[in-house]
Image: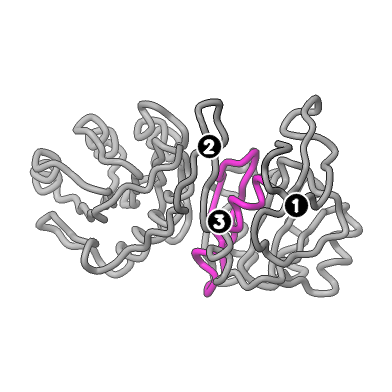
Amino acid sequence: MDNLNFELIKTLEHGANKQQVATLNKTQEIVDYETPFELTYGDIVSMTKAVEIASEFFDVKGTVLVKNGKVTGAALGSDLSNSLIKAIDCNPVDALSGVVAFTHRVDKKTAMQLSAGHLVVAPEFDVDTLEVFEKNSIRYVKLNTPLKEFKNFIEEEVVITPFGTLVQETNKTELDKENFKVVTKLKPSVEQIEDSIFAWKVAKYVKSNGIVVAKDFKTLAIAQGMQSQAVEYAMNYACDTAKEAVMASDLPITVADFNAALQNRISVFILPGVTQEIIKLADKYEKIIITTGFTTSLL
């Protein structure tokens, strides 16, 4: 650590575990934020993940829930309160604590649905919202940097290993009409395309193998960091809610994966690529497959 060009911001109470020493450092330009609370190592890791996803939806009302660095729910709604309710419904147990990132100003109605286990991150807060937070011992972070600019602050990903330090560009891949292709006979509706894009944007930030099941701008199940059976896990979790939903995968799927999703009546698949065998199965069972042309997996 001593030979790295880090500019110390502060020493944290501890790292990921209490026996680990940790510091917060400046290595490049950082986002502008303010909070009256001391943030932990875990807070910053989860907050980063939550805001990354929230920044994908900066122009709509949305909520992202992250616990221990993993996405537990995401949704868009008619207002923030509605989006929060929808996001919580994906995983009600883990939603009791962790980071909650909002895309817009947090009002009192939304604040009343939060509890002391939450760390709330948002661009703005109403005055009566802060009163609710103080009364209920809810921590918060005000993000002064506009959400639409957030991704510009993460230029490189760095992993320090005993074999050397790995540096790679941040995955800022966006869908474009050149790569976005419907490869099945059946074509998606406008609503299905919108849900597919929503699911794909969330899937970009879950660890591989990553599966996101979504419908009506709401995650129904998220499988992440699984080496196998990710699709089966997501289908078992989503259960009957997967009917006519979208399934996004960060990697190509197998025939067994397709069959598992078929049993849960998934209607649309959005995938990096697909084999002719799976396309034929999709046409046989009148399913829709959209390909993006690239993987988005996170290690």
**Which residues are drawn in magenta?**
45-74
Q: Residue at x 22, y 33 (%)?
A: 254
Task: Tell me which amino acid carries mark 3.
Answer: Lys
Q: Position of residue 182 (x, y in %)?
A: 18, 59
Q: Position of residue 18 (x, y in %)?
A: 80, 28
Residue at position x 41%, y 52% from top? 214
Number of labels in the image equals 3
Residue occupying the far front of the picture:
3
Residue 66, relative to residue 230: is it above or below? below
Q: Cβ–Cβ below 8 Å for labels 3 and 1?
A: no
Q: Is residue 56 magenta?
A: yes
Between the residue at mark 3 and the residue at mark 2, the CA separation in whole angstroms equals 40 Å
- Image location (x, y in percent) of residue 101: 65, 58
Q: What element carries label 3?
A: helix
Sequence-wise, the earlier of marks 1 and 2 is 1
Q: Mark 2 points at which residue?
A: 165
Q: Is mark 1 on a helix, strand or loop?
A: strand
Q: Where is residue 157 in the image (x, y as percent from the top left)?
A: 52, 48
In front: mark 3 or mark 1? 1
Q: Which of marks 3 and 2 is in front?
A: 2
